[in-house]
Amino acid sequence: MDNILKETKSRIIGLDIIRSVAILIVLYGHAGILLPTTVAKKYYEFLPQLDGVALFFVLSGFLIGLIFLKMIESSSFTITDLLNFGMRRWFRTLPNYFLVLAILIGYRIIIFHNTNGFSWNYVFFFQNFAWRQPGFFRESWSLSVEEWFYLLFPLVCFIFYKCLKNKFSAILYTLLTFLIFPLLLRIIKYSFNIGSQDLGEDYNMIVVLRIDSLMYGIIAACLYRYKRALWIQYKLIALIAGLAVIIFMEIDPKKWLQSYPPLYSNIQSIAILGLMPFFSELKSTKNSMVDNLFVWISKLSYGLYLLNLTLMIRYIIPAVHNLIGWKYKSVELTYKTDYLIFWVGNLVGAYLIYSFYEKPTTNLRDRFKFSSKRKSISHSNGVL
């Protein structure tokens, strides 16, 4: 654990808090699957089902946006810069994803002697590109949304830059493109009643209909970088407004869902954007133990997300039952034991993955870099 916490002093704790809250919301929601229906009803009433993935999307867009803006400011924005940007991002996300995907495939082959449910679409993140995702690796839907965003956002911006010869205009037109087209597709789908209309399966979990959620993080990054004074001045007002909208949406979420589904993710993302100024300026909670806890959870969050649903609930917990041959004396003992296995197993598994696989593979990205004969152009004043 010491290795995980040694960088705490250099981190922005506010962002670790957002990431930690996001993954805990996801885990809390999925853990309820293990509970009997009567218990689950009271369980979910204890804490409203906030969308942890929405927090992840805006936060990811914000962090990637800051990196991207710095990159295009300090370089001539060539195809080489684009490749290096993508390379660093993919070294961060792909190894863990393919490790867990390989484990799931291997488990099915060894235990069930088949790969039912698996599709090569999972290898190329096409599993939910414009359609419902199969049930083989359920939680991977959000990774698919993010990976397509990491690919398309820089590429579209690069194309606009080559056409317009102006970095600021390229960013602006890319923002508009990603904000307008997914919303337009959702409106068309809803207005003409195309396909089924489930908010989660048919709107929020499909790449082409949800990819704009990360763009609100990019907007936050632009405000942070180019309107910093206003970003700091209005951080409390934005925080209160964002929390008010989130709470209001959670008071009667069904009413919001039924009113106009195409706008639901937009409103939610804008509300989360409102939280970013306050938390991005929160360097510490003034309590080292609390800071360390949030850093620890934040660093394990990716592994926790990949492990908790399909692998843990669908495969590992049933396998533990069969391996040990537990014969529970009561339903209550069964779900309480499973619930404990869920939390302990996920934390231990994510810690092992982070320490012995995720961190080493992420560090490899510094060894791989595309080179260009052209020299970078530095903009010391930070103007696009």
Image: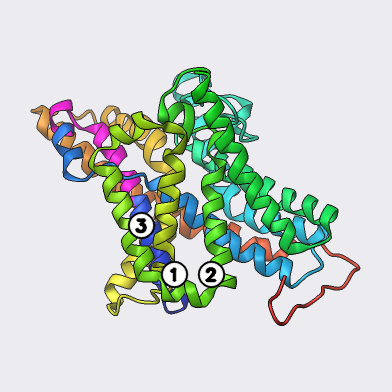
- Residue 342, image x, y percentages: 28, 42
Q: Residue at x 45, y 37 (%)?
A: 139
The boundaries of the magenta stretch are: 24-40
Residue 37 among those drawn in magenta: yes
Residue 257 visible (yes or no):
yes
Q: Residue at x 31, y 38 (%)?
A: 30
Residue 147 visible (yes or no):
no
The amino acid type found where label 1 is placed reads: Ser
- Residue 44, image x, y percentages: 20, 38
Which residue is denoted by mark 2 in the rendering? 224
Which residue is denoted by mark 1 in the rendering? 280
Q: Residue at x 23, y 42 (%)?
A: 251
Residue 170 among those drawn in magenta: no
The amino acid type found where label 2 is placed reads: Tyr
Image colouring: rainbow
Name the image quarter holding the C terminus.
bottom right
Q: Nearer the viewer, residue 271 or 152?
A: 271
Which residue is denoted by mark 3 in the rendering? 242
Q: Nearer the viewer, mark 1 or mark 2?
A: 2
